[in-house]
């Protein structure tokens, strides 16, 4: 079943720039881990807001688990599709971790005991149990963002959409979040849509699409997409350093695979060297 | 800067922390009433004793409570100076020009300073020992009767808790903008009063703009988490009245009665 399906969706902010999203067809299968890549202004954040009705499509329709998103189904859709935003400071509503995680569960009117269980579940899923009664303002960026994910998890969503949720974090915080996201997808079977401009992060996904000017311009497995790096450059997406080295080695005639993993590349080089000698 | 005293919860578990926030709010009001009813030092001493007792049972370090006075330090010094120099009275200690230092002036300023300090310290005790969520829940519960006249109690309580939640974030932001402007050659430390006030403008405008952006993003995040006002909303933390609250209530009642008795039987110092 498709968790999210966009059928010929158009959206514009009513400015002169034209469509932010234009005639987009895109679907995410239940349990999938999809990455949406694109540089600033490619329409990827707009798309995220269309997934749970923060924005309403001008034309076309967005279906969430087969139900068309409109005024009446909005509330149910938001329970099923959780959004995690970019800035950790601007999405926590309470000063104390557990109060913030409880917010969503309180909004949907769950009984107290159930909310308690949801907080425990959500905090343990992101590895923040011990911070339950800490002040949010005293946490690191990565920890704050884990709390934000927990706040979304408390609604027991089937899909989590991360809208550049690692962009404001340091490398360590970024790793923490990616580990959590991978675990949620594998262990809790939550569908993940990862919106990012870091190609390394997209490597974890089972499928990736590239957006440019409100349209999907490339799709395939992350590896397939990386192998077309010249095309990526035209959409203002550069390979990370390790990918570039990989490409240069290939151009020099070394038989290494397309990879963004330093270990893998080292193995391939070692293999090539032993072959040569 | 990050350790701004007011509005910062001090996360430990204690007798005072466990009190019902509604009771704490009422207790604070009672305490403030007592401070204003007290017209002699015995009354203030009774208030101070209750405050010290509260601090002792809250496990909040005393220096933290004392530090909260820093916020009004200027006010305290200013009123003291004014009162000592201009209060007038019979027992004159010194006299130059329009200034007269009298015994009555000194006593009166001491009284006023004590009053202000007690006020500030007891108010900050409330925010040290009560999470913003508990505080707003308490306020919402106390104001429930106003819902009858369609007063938006829930919205008001939410606004208050969000404001408290945003204090540390805005503090950080201010510091960041200030540093950014300093790096561009802005000078906040020299010049007269007017020049310094003018220097604040380049901090204020970016801060205001970013606050709007924050508010917008926060709204989106809240909507995403199914927020629809107080319709069908439940509360995770239920407010419950316990034996602790009864004890605290009795203490508050005793304080107000005590101060009134002291007022009646001992008369005014000032």
Image (spheres, rainbow, N blue to C red):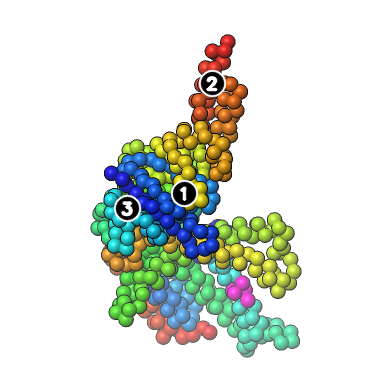
Q: How far separated are the C-alphas under marks 2 and 1?
A: 34 Å
| Quadrant in the picture for the C terminus of chain A | top right
Q: Is residue A196 left or right of residue A252?
A: left
Chain under numbered label 2: A
Q: Give the answer, above or below, for where A8 lies relative to A228.
A: below
Question: Label 1 near label 2: C-beta < 8 Å?
Answer: no
Q: How far separated are the C-alphas under marks 2 and 3?
A: 44 Å
User: Mark 3 or mark 2, which is nearer the start of the sequence?
Assistant: 3
Q: Give the answer, above or below, for where A117 lies relative to B259.
A: above
Image position, residue A66 (x, y; %): 28, 51
Mark nearest the camera among 2 and 1 is: 1
Closer to the camera in the image, B183 or B120: B183
Which residue is located at x 67 percent, y 71 percent? B197
Which residue is located at x 54 percent, y 35 percent? A229
Residue B77 is covered by the magenta coloring: yes
Chain under numbered label 3: A
Question: Label 3 near label 1: C-beta < 8 Å?
Answer: no
Dominant secondary structure, magenta: helix
User: Residue A63 has which mark?
Assistant: 3
User: Mark 3 or mark 1, which is nearer the start of the sequence?
Assistant: 3
Residue stretch in magenta: B74-78
Helix, strand or loop for disc 1: strand
Image position, residue B88 (x, y; %): 63, 87
- Residue where numbered disc 2 is placed: A255
Q: Is residue B15 visible?
A: no
| Quadrant in the picture for the N terminus of chain A | top left
Residue A16 is covered by the magenta coloring: no
> 10 Å neighbourhood of mark 1: few (<14), some, or many (≥20)?
many
- Residue where numbered disc 1 is placed: A215
Q: Give the answer, above or below, for where B49 lies relative to A121.
A: below
Q: Which quadrant of the structure image shows residue B257? A: bottom left
């Amino acid at each position: 079943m498709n968790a999210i399906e966009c059928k010929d969706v158009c959206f514009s902010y009513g400015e002169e720039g034209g469509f932010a999203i234009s005639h987009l067809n895109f679907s995410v299968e239940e349990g999938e881990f999809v990455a949406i890549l694109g540089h600033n202004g490619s329409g990827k954040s707009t798309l995220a807001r269309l997934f749970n009705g923060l924005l309403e499509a001008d034309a076309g329709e967005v279906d969430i688990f087969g139900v068309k998103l409109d005024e009446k189904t909005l509330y149910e859709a938001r329970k099923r599709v959780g959004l995690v935003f970019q800035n950790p400071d601007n999405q926590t509503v309470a000063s104390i971790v557990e109060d913030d995680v409880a917010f969503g569960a309180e909004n949907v009117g769950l009984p107290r005991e159930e909310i308690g269980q949801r907080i425990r579940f959500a905090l343990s899923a992101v590895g923040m149990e011990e911070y339950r009664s800490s002040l949010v303002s005293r946490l690191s960026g990565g920890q704050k963002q884990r709390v934000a994910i927990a706040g979304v998890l408390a609604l027991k969503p089937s899909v989590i959409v991360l809208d550049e949720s690692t962009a404001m974090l340091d490398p360590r915080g970024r790793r923490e979040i990616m580990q959590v996201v991978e675990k949620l997808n594998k262990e809790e079977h939550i569908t993940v849509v990862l919106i990012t401009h870091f190609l390394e992060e997209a490597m974890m996904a089972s499928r990736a699409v590239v957006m440019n000017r409100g349209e999907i311009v490339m799709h395939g497995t992350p590896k397939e997409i990386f192998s077309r790096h010249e095309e990526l450059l035209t959409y203002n997406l550069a390979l990370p350093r390790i990918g570039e080295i990989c490409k240069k080695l290939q151009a020099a005639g070394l038989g290494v695979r397309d990879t963004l993993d330093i270990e893998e590349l080292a193995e391939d080089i070692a293999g090539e060297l032993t072959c040569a000698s | 800067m990050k350790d701004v005293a007011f509005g910062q919860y001090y996360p430990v578990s204690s007798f005072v922390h466990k009190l019902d926030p509604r009771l704490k709010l009422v207790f604070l009001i009672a305490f403030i009433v007592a401070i204003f009813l007290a017209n002699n030092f015995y009354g203030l001493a009774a208030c101070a004793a209750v405050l010290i007792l509260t601090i002792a049972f809250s496990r909040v370090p005393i220096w933290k409570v004392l530090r909260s006075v820093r916020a009004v330090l200027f006010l305290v010094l200013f009123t003291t100076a004014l009162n000592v120099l201009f209060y007038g009275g019979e027992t004159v200690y010194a006299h130059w020009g329009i200034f007269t230092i009298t015994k009555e002036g000194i006593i009166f300023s001491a009284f006023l300073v004590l009053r202000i300090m007690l006020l500030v310290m007891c108010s900050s005790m409330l925010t040290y020992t009560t999470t913003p969520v508990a505080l707003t829940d308490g306020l919402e519960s106390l104001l429930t009767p106003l819902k009858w006249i369609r007063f938006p109690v829930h919205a008001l309580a939410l606004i208050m808790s969000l404001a408290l939640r945003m204090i540390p974030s805005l503090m950080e932001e201010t510091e960041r903008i200030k540093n950014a402007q300093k790096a561009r050659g802005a000078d906040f430390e020299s010049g007269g009063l007017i020049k310094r006030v003018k220097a604040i403008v380049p901090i204020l405008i970016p801060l205001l703009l970013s606050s709007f952006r924050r508010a917008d993003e926060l709204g989106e995040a809240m909507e995403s988490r199914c927020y629809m006002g107080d319709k069908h909303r439940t509360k995770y933390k239920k407010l419950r009245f316990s034996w602790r609250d009864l004890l605290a209530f009795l203490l508050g009642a005793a304080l107000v009665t005590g101060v009134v008795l002291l007022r009646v039987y001992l008369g005014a110092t000032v």
